[in-house]
Image (tube, helix red, strand yellow):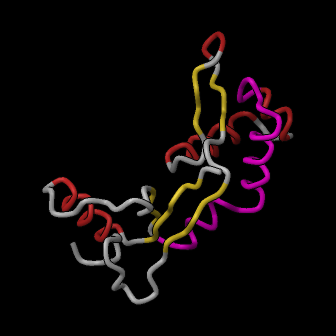
Amino acid sequence: MKTLEIGIASYDQMKARTLAIARGEHMPAKGEPKVWFTSIESFAKLLSEHNRHLLGLIARERPRSITELADLAGRSKSNLSRTLKTMSRYGLVQLQPGERGTLVPRVPYDQVRLDVSLTGMKSGSADASP
């Protein structure tokens, strides 16, 4: 089972973490989140029930194009494309080249794990000071 580790941190915290990694001051630990959201609400919106259904449909039916997925999902291709591109930015969907210039959606993970610091003191995450 493949799991995507996701964290919640402010933009400033994510920037500080990224700069600390670039300077060699922080080495991400195994299991540390690789994908970050600025709020639990933005994470919840992206993984709404509607979008989780879409991810399940992709995994189960393995459509050969976004057009085929739009037909299966009963959604317009333009609306679906925007959703898939957003999911792709967060690693929830991969859009691979297909036949004749099509994009083939794939779901690379079975589950996600959300890492949230309740106190802001968690060591090694974007929530802690670098």
Q: Furthest residue to the top?
A: 100
- 7 drawn magenta: no
Residue appearing at x 55%, y 73% in the figure? 40
Residue appearing at x 31%, y 71% in the figure? 124
Residue 28 x %, y %: 31, 60
Query: Range of the magenta residues?
Result: 39-67
| Total numbered labels | 0
Magenta segment, prevailing SS (helix, strand or loop): helix
55 and 84: which one is in front?
55
Residue 78 x %, y %: 68, 35
- Is residue 2 placed above or below 61 in the rendered structure? below
Q: Furthest residue to the bottom?
A: 119
Residue appearing at x 65%, y 42% in the figure? 107
- Is residue 13 placed above or below 51 in the rendered structure? below
- 57 drawn magenta: yes
- Is residue 79 left or right of 128 when viewed as pictured? right
- Is residue 119 placed above or below 30 in the rendered structure? below
In the figure, residue 27 lies in which quadrant? bottom left
- Is residue 90 left or right of 122 when viewed as pictured? right
| Quadrant of image for the C terminus | bottom left
Residue 123 x %, y %: 32, 78
Residue 11 x %, y %: 34, 67
Residue appearing at x 13%, y 56% in the figure? 23
